[in-house]
Image: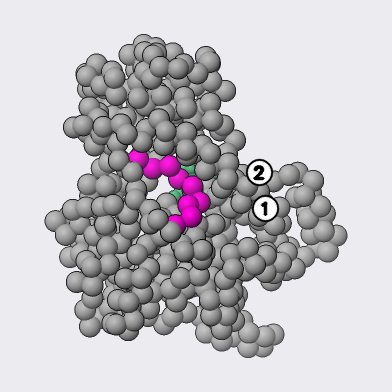
Amino acid sequence: MSKQPIQSGAGASTPALLGGEPAFDQPINVTRALAPEPSQLQERLASIHASRWYTNDGPLARELEQRLVEALGVGFCAAFCNGTSALQAALRHLDLSGEVITTPFTFPATVHAIEWNGLTPVFCDIDPESWNLDPARAAERVTSATSAIVPVHVFGNPCDVGALGALAEARELRLVYDAAHAFGARLEGRSLAGYGDLSVLSFHATKLFHTAEGGAVTGEDASHYRPLHLLRNFGIAGEDLVQGVGLNGKMSELHAALGLSLLEAAFEEITARARLAAVYDGLLGSVPGLRFQRFPETAEKNHAYYAIRVEAEAFGLSRDEVHHALRAENIVTRRYFFPLCSENESYRALPSARPEGLPEAHRLADEVLCLPLYGELGEAAVARCAKTLLGLREAAPQLRRALARHGDA
Ligand code: T4K
């Protein structure tokens, strides 16, 4: 994959933007979807072929739900065709009204799901250490119109579930966790898929565990399953009975087949990524100008992402300069989540979207960078990514001039 053997000294080679050889001869993406053992998938596809049963609550979708209940240790799991429709259905099911407090530091789907339900998103600033919704600031945003809070376990880092739970209880608000990044992550031994009234997972191909497209609503209270099932099935309760306004949010048998064939591998992937994250930590952990998300001590990480903050002054290059310089090395990083959702045309007129109310989120969105992390990448390639980044730091002044000439960052 890489052109030359890994060099031992950080920054031993000239950055590609300054005329050196790129660190990799092929692009290394931020992630690479987990692939199933072909025979496992083929067997399940053959069963679909034999039965001709492709969707509508099929046996494989049901089996996947059951396997996820067991693997995550939750009370129920309702599978959906993607995480966004699972979020939409979860919010609809709770019969919310008025305002919903959420974070601007998330993927647009979180906020869109609120808006699609005819609710008003209220942006609230994040905690600068965890990068998650700040419960104290959330408390200040509660009004008589607030009906729910939708925090996000950003990059699989548990939210302050104690404080958010207490706030929701005290103000009689619903609590729906966007747990799109949180498959396999645990807090105090408990899966993040079991917190709040409901939690929502994404099984998109970019996620650690995936079904190509897919998602689920999970939680402890299994009485939620039936209404969520109705919501994902047009509200159809029987041959001649439509109960309410549903959507088509069903997971197909093909997607479930993929998920069933990847479930064990996803847990092995967490172990593989932990080893790779340790390589990054060892090389980058104490570099001036780089900072990291703080996880609670009782968290078991899923290593869904490897995110850093680049502090321009101390590092010598801004996040965007690093992003562009790494791209020239064929290291494709992602600026999740830049720009903030509150900057989106559809939301920026909201009073809560004003940048002065969201200083921590803005700072983070300008500094965050997700580095490549997936099991197949291997330790040598991860070390090369990290050392290439360190090499950029050493050549920062020259790189800055070169980037300014290109007008790139
Ligand atoms: N809430 C949160 C907090 C979320 O982050 C998301 C989704 C949702 C809700 C909604 O869940 P879903 O409705 O999507 O289930 C990706 C994903 O499309 C999106 O699911 C995800 N969050 C978001 C953080 O990232 P992009 O635009 O970055 O994906 P893309 O196509 O650039 O892919 C990134 C890298 O992944 C590629 O460079 C290579 C690799 N890849 C990608 C695909 C599509 C593969 O290896 N195989 C693939 O099939 O959005």
Q: Which residue is at the front of the view, 347 or 186?
A: 186
In this picture, residue 95 sits left or right of residue 141: right
Q: Position of residue 321 (x, y in %)?
A: 28, 29
Spatial separation of the CA atoms under disc 2 and disc 1: 12 Å
Q: Which mark is residue 35?
A: 2
> Start and end of the magenta stretch?
299-308
Q: Which mark is residue 254?
A: none
- Whether residues under marks 2 and 1 lie with C-beta atoms below 8 angstroms apart, the answer is no
Identify the residue at the far front of this view. Answer: 297
Q: Which residue is mark 1?
A: 264
Q: Magenta includes 342?
A: no
Q: Residue at x 55, y 62 (%)?
A: 215
Q: Residue at x 25, y 81 (%)?
A: 145
Identified by mark 1, the residue type is Glu
Q: Is mark 1 within 8 Å of ligand 1?
A: no
Q: Magenta includes 303?
A: yes
